[in-house]
Amino acid sequence: MQVSITGRHVDLTEPLKAYVDDKLQHLKHSFDHVVDVHVVLSVEKFRQRCEVSMQASGINIHGTHETEDMYASIDGVVDKLNRQLKRYRAKLRRHRGDPVGREIKVSHRILDMASEKEELTEDHQPETLRHEQIDAKPMSVDEAVMQLELGSRDILFFTNGQTEQLNAVYRRPDGALSWIEPETA
């Protein structure tokens, strides 16, 4: 397990680094597939915040906790991550195997719509600001919802294990989750 610790407006002392590393080793004991962990410790006035992003066997887990004491913030975020990992392990045990299906590559583009122009011509092609490839892995809807809740993204594309079609689960602005599934013709 590779751990990187970053401090924002806080001195990263050796005892603080050792405390973070010790707490994260407990997570490794409860879930041994943890690959990479990134910790950000920050201080703003009286708020002491700890953010942890973790990659573990194909899933991304993110947690934050904020208190007036940095050690309490670290303890809080480790507790949150431990609960998330336990839920994930329980779902894996209930699932009993991987769904049959194939992985699909999905392309995601963010376009510049040139807001300074009042009218756009028919042949106008918006400029691509960012382009990323996303793997839509085979999983059930329950697993997709869990992945969305554990991760830091607002949308997750996946191949539905039952229908073998591309589906999406996303978080709406009001906080509710929505599921997009194509209808069969």
Image (tube, helix red, strand yellow):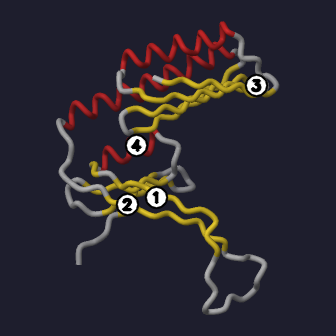
Q: Amino acid at mark 2?
A: Lys
Asked whether 51 or 126 is in front, the reply is 126
Going by the numbered disc 3, the residue's amino acid type is: Val
- In the image, taking residue 110 as reference, residue 86 lies left or right, namely left
Please tell me which residue is depicted at 28% across the width and 29% down the height of the picture. 90
Q: Are there few (<14), some (14-19), or many (20+) residues within 10 Å of tag 4?
A: many
Q: CA distance from mark 1 to mark 3?
A: 35 Å
Q: Residue at x 40, y 43 (%)?
A: 147
Location of the N terminus by quadrant is top left
- Mark 1 → mark 4, Cα distance in angstroms: 18 Å
In which quadrant will I find the C terminus? bottom left
Q: For the residue labelled by badge 3, is the local secondary structure a helix, a strand or a loop?
A: strand
Residue that mark 4 sits on: 147
Which of marks 4 and 1 precedes in the sequence? 1
* Residue tagged 1: 133
User: Which comes before the other along the chain, label 3 or label 4?
Assistant: 3
User: Where 157 sits versus 88, above or below?
Assistant: below
Q: Secondary structure at mark 1?
A: strand
Q: Position of residue 108 (x, y in %)?
A: 50, 63
Relative side of 145 to 139, left or right: right
Disc 3 versus disc 2: distance between alpha carbons? Answer: 40 Å
Q: Residues within 10 Å of mark 2 (few under 14, many from 20)?
A: some
Q: Residue furthest top?
A: 15
Question: How far across and down, in percent of the image, does residue 30 sit?
Answer: 36, 18
Q: Amino acid at mark 4?
A: Gln
